[in-house]
Image (cartoon, rainbow, N blue to C red):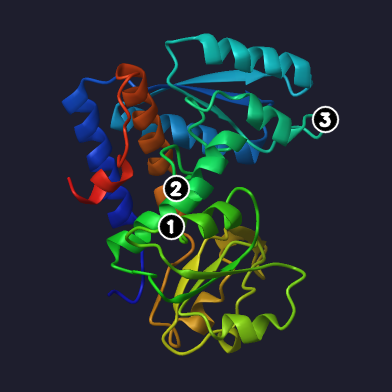
Amino acid sequence: MDKQLTGKPVATKLKNFIKAKIEQESLQPTMALIQLGKDPASQFYVENIIKNGAKLGCHIDLITLAVETTEAELAVKIQDLNDDVSYHGIMIQKPLPRHIDDTEINSLVSPLKDIDSLNPINLGKIVLEADGFLPCTPFAVWLMMQYYGIDPQGKKLVILGRSAVVGKPLANILLWKRPFANATVTVCHSKTKDLEMITQEADILISAIGVPHFVKPDMIRDGAILIDVGINEVSDEPGETKYVGDIDYNGCIDKALAITPVPGGVGTVTTAVLMANLVKASLGHKYPNKKIDGFFDLIFNA
């Protein structure tokens, strides 16, 4: 296993799978990407999604609404897109304005088009190990573990963070009764007592709390595998902005068996994962009466 677990080779393998599947099935995966306002940070991610989707053969329609759009107006737009058969997937760029309830809006996106896997039905399918979409970041972590042969079966795996976007779905995925799962999972959060004692026992530590360099060398054991999901914007002494992870990379690298960098790690894979979900949604549209089970297992068996 490499010491540095970079995301680029994983993303490349996933992108090759996507392009091959689109060509093989003669698909035209099409997604509606809704953005309220033009927040500069969000705009970067939106443009990145559109650009990378086009390279893979996926078409993304950007639907820009005013930041003052009401929750009722957004709900109507989502329903229109749910009913529009020309769209296979729907994504809503986050964060939404404060006057809009995220949970309510997530539940309005059709589970068949919910490629971000935020609808409660799709989140519930993860718990039940049922076929559905997987959230982009947890799926990216799972794919990286498979690519690098990190089998968590029977191992002590600690996740820092309990969000509905990363921590909770990832914990459930790694509890599945299937390859690259079957872990003994502990989820820690801001109220966890004796945190260092727990993290020091982890064979695999995954951090997704959004605190720069939170995980220090004294929090890990020798030979632990560290997967960093955090992407935190910080300023160095000259005042220049840079991005760092939740894990103190330079401090922990010598003690760890392997570690993901930030940037260049898990985040590199997430956009490709979104497109993989879009391709799956497109296949579901093409074969409405055929269960597309085991789709994600095909990625490393192709």
Q: What amino acid is labelled 2 in the image?
A: Glu
- For disc 2, the marked residue is 129
Q: Element type at marker 1?
A: loop
Q: Is residue 247 above or below residue 101?
A: below
Task: Give the CA separation, mark 1 to mark 3.
Answer: 37 Å
Image quadrant where one finds the C terminus: top left
Residue 79: quarter of image: top right
Q: What amino acid is labelled 3 in the image?
A: His
Disc with the residue nearer the chain's start (3 vs 2): 3
Q: Residue at x 29, y 60 (%)?
A: 147
Q: What amino acid is labelled 1 in the image?
A: Trp
Q: Nearer the viewer, mark 1 or mark 3?
A: 1
Q: Is residue 266 above or below residue 19?
A: below
Whole-percent x, y for residue 35 in the image: 62, 26
Crowd rating for badge 3 (residues with CA inside 10 Å; few <14, some 14–19, many 20+): few
Cβ–Cβ under 8 Å for marks 1 and 2: yes
Crowd rating for badge 2 (residues with CA inside 10 Å; few <14, some 14–19, many 20+): some
Task: Give the CA separation, mark 1 to mark 2.
Answer: 7 Å
Q: Is residue 259 left or right of residue 151?
A: right
Q: Is residue 223 left or right of residue 95?
A: left
Whole-percent x, y for residue 172 in the image: 52, 56
Disc with the residue nearer the chain's start (1 vs 3): 3
- For disc 1, the marked residue is 176
Q: Is residue 83 above or below residue 108?
A: above
Q: Element type at marker 3?
A: loop
Pick whichever, 252 or 116, lies toward us: 116
